[in-house]
Amino acid sequence: MQNRSKPTVAGSYYGSPAEKQVFLRKVFDDTASHYEAIAKWGWFGSGDWYRREALLRNGVTPNMRVLDVATGTGQVARALMKILDNADQIECVEPSAGMIEESKKTVPAIHHQSTAEVLPVESERFDFLTMGFALRHVDNLEDSFREFRRVLKDGGTALIMDVTVPKGAFPRFFFRAYFKYILPIASGILTWDKNVYLLMKYYWDSMDQMVDVDDVIRNLKLAGFSNVQHNTLLGCFSEYVAVR
Ligand SMILES: C[S@@+](CC[C@H](N)C(=O)[O-])C[C@H]1O[C@@H](n2cnc3c(N)ncnc32)[C@H](O)[C@@H]1O
């Protein structure tokens, strides 16, 4: 069985799986200045509350040193800042320069420009590692999870949060109608930016072809993590927790 995540919707957005990261970097760079607002109203303001609650429930405590992977505009890092003693206990990894620029406006922490597959930080440095809403963007799950394990101290925890499309026919219908049609069209019109429309179209397509739960769990175990657990909340938030 291969360990690459599915080459999500390659045909319509990029020529081959090899071009996926180039596409992602460009689309996130192009839309970085709008991303924060769309993420906020697109999820009806629930995002900040959910992230903080998930961090606390999964064991983040004030004295920890934390690495946030796929920082984006800083949503998880800001939730961490509300829990940790100091913002300088956080380091961020994010490939898009545009997203880093936005994140730095509110997150006074070190930002490294890189992907989950190559974490430019020393080994066994962190007590906790987070990655929010980026599973479907990662090329190689096993390599990324090996990196996550490398940078965690013994006993350290990785928390990966993402979206799951609800299973029931009725909730799935509404979820699909909202994320496939309403959100891309509304955000495209409100920003009058075709790149935002493209990002939000990709957002749904990549969500619809999300990496399988079993695949994520298998790769976490292959990377050497123990106590690997998966929970789904409110039918649409997926959390993976694994201990080094
Ligand atoms: C939807 S945003 C999530 C931002 C934030 N973590 C949150 O909780 O909302 C996804 C981020 O993943 C980043 N990304 C894309 N490919 C990545 C990769 N291979 N490794 C790490 N991050 C990646 C994108 O640049 C983007 O900023």
Image (cartoon, helix red, strand yellow):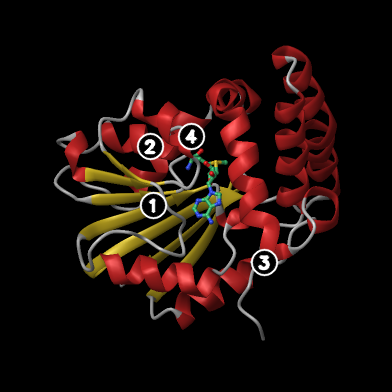
Give the amino acid at mark 2.
Answer: Arg
Asked whether disc 1 touches disc 4, contact meaning CB atoms under 8 Å apart, the reply is: no
* Numbered disc in front, either 3 or 4: 4
Crowding at dot 4, Cα within 10 Å, few <14 / some 14-19 / many 20+, comes out as: many
Badge number at residue 52? 2
Give the alpha-carbon distance from disc 3 to disc 4, as whole Å.
27 Å
Q: Does the image show residue 84?
A: yes
Disc 1 beta carbon < 8 A from ligand 1? yes
Element marked by disc 3:
loop
Give the alpha-carbon distance from disc 2 to disc 4, as whole Å.
20 Å
Asked whether disc 3 touches disc 4, contact meaning CB atoms under 8 Å apart, the reply is: no
Disc 4 beta carbon < 8 A from ligand 1? yes
Pointer 4 residue: 99
Q: Nearer the viewer, residue 52 or 117?
A: 117
Name the residue located 14 percent from the left edge and 46 percent from the top edge.
63
Name the residue located 57 percent from the left edge and 59 percent from the top edge.
138
- Residue 61 position, x and y percent, is 21, 46
Q: Nearer the viewer, residue 71 or 80?
A: 71
- The quadrant where residue 85 appears: top left
- Residue 92 position, x and y percent, is 34, 45
User: Which is nearer the N-term, disc 1 or disc 4?
Assistant: 4
Please indicate whether residue 116 sits to the left or right of residue 59 in the image.
Answer: right
Pointer 1 residue: 130
* Numbered disc in front, either 1 or 2: 1
User: Which is nearer the N-term, disc 2 or disc 3?
Assistant: 2
The image shows residue 223, relative to residue 10, as above or below, that is below
Give the amino acid at mark 1.
Answer: Thr
- Residue 36 position, x and y percent, is 53, 25
* Numbered disc in front, either 1 or 4: 4
Disc 2 beta carbon < 8 A from ligand 1? no
